[in-house]
Amino acid sequence: MSIKYAVVGATGNVGREMLQILAEKKIPAKDVTALASERSVGVEVTYGEDDVLKVDVLSDFDFEGTDIVLSSAGAKVSAEFASRATDAGAVIIDNTSHFRMDPDVPLVVPEVNPGAIAGYGKKNIIANPNCSTIQMVVALKPLHDLFKIERVVVSTYQSVSGAGKEAMDELFNQTRGVYVNEPEHKFREVFPKPIAFNVIPQIDVFMEDGSTKEEWKMMVETKKILDPKIKVSATCVRVPVFIGHAEAVNVQFAKSVSADEARAALRNAPGVTVVDHRVEEGYVTPSEAAGEDPVYVSRIREDPTIENGINMWVVADNLQGRRAQRRADQRPADQRIYGEGRVTAAASRVSSLPGSTRQSIAPNFGPPGQARG
Ligand code: 2RA
């Protein structure tokens, strides 16, 4: 008997990625239900290259017979529907913040703590962390195993897609507005300040201690996944990039570590690709990581200002996309010429953007499947 899936938040950035990945894994369209709020009644979402799914309304959906629910519609939505799904026998893999810190819910990154999944049965829920935490812990794990991390100081450079499709539109419209002399406030709904030609040191709401919730998440989630003894200090910043988060990570270890030792540990780590040539183009940027699977680590170097310190630059596709350009370029990642292949991904991403943004950006990427080089 086949496994039945439901994707909650199917019209959002991450929901569409989830559908794409299910399709790539050859899960037949008949076994997948796309769910969203009433606002999406009548909407259709693409499923793989050939199929289209009609979106069903989450509040009316009967989860009886559904085996796995992939959810990314926001914490409030997960809080509301979760027990309805688990009571009906489904297991939820939740991409929202709602269950992450629940002690009865494992918080799992497959490359880092796959064993934690064993605890899913207490609530039939598995949480996965915030995207900015995921890429950082994937890079930290091999280093912690070998050298024991004591403290992490991270500054993030997070793309607008982390805030949803409307945020991508906002960046696009504000950027265009500058050139056609349209006031930026006409397009200011998602971000508290202009994002075009700017950076914003606020992601999510402020906490009492002056940090933002995104910064708090990076701290508590890293502790839950890796080690509660690790101290984490984060500053999270939104930058005018469509897809791909970058992080400047400073790590202090319990014992001395050379840059070469750190690089060697990272080269052997699951999910990590080291691209670290100390020359121009010898590092990875967010637009190069868009559509790619790995967490890229570049700029690995010793920090002489602290004891046992290493600096590194960690970049990944924040939408966790797995895309067709893997087929387009099978060479080892550190031998690729960036600019090939991943353009395919960008183009197919663009095809899922709302109308005006899509039409204006798409020509710059060329037709899907064609690399611009
Ligand atoms: C962001 N990390 O980039 C968040 C999304 N969960 O806004």
Image (cartoon, rainbow, N blue to C red):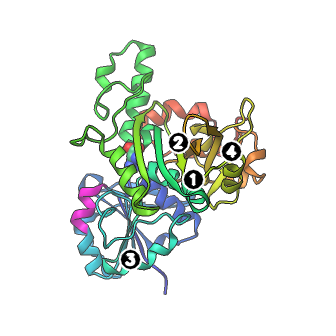
Q: Amino acid at mark 1?
A: Ala
The structure residue drawn at horizontal position 52% and vertical position 59%, both measured from the top left corner, is 20
- Tell whether label 1 touches label 3 (CB within 8 Å): no
Instruction: Name the amino acid type tagged 3.
Output: Tyr
Q: Give the structural element (helix, strand or loop) at label 2.
A: strand
The answer to whether residue 129 is left or right of residue 241 is left
The answer to whether mark 3 is within 8 Å of ligand 1 is no
The CA span between labels 4 and 1 is 14 Å
In this picture, is 35 found above or below 262?
below
- State if disc 2 and disc 1 touch (CB < 8 Å): yes
Label 1 environment density (alpha carbons within 10 Å; few <14, some 14–19, many ≥20): many
Residue at mark 3 to residue at mark 1: CA–CA distance: 24 Å
The residue at the point 75 percent across, 31 percent down is: 279
**How far across and down, in percent of the image, does residue 260 sit?**
72, 47
Disc 1: which residue: 139
Q: Which residue is mark 2?
A: 249
Q: Are dots 3 and 2 in contact, CB under 8 Å? A: no
On residue 259, the disc is 4
Nearer the N terminus, badge 3 or badge 2? 3
Q: Nearer the viewer, mark 3 or mark 4?
A: 4
As measured in the structure, the alpha-carbon distance from the residue carrying label 3 to the one carrying label 2 is 31 Å
What's under tag 2, amino acid-wise?
A: Val
Q: Is mark 1 within 8 Å of ligand 1?
A: no
Is there any visible trace of residue 319 in the rendered image? no
* Mark closer to the chain start, 4 or 1: 1
- Mark 3 is surrounded, within 10 Å at the Cα level, by few (under 14), some (14 to 19) or many (20 or more) other residues, namely some
The label shown at residue 120 is 3
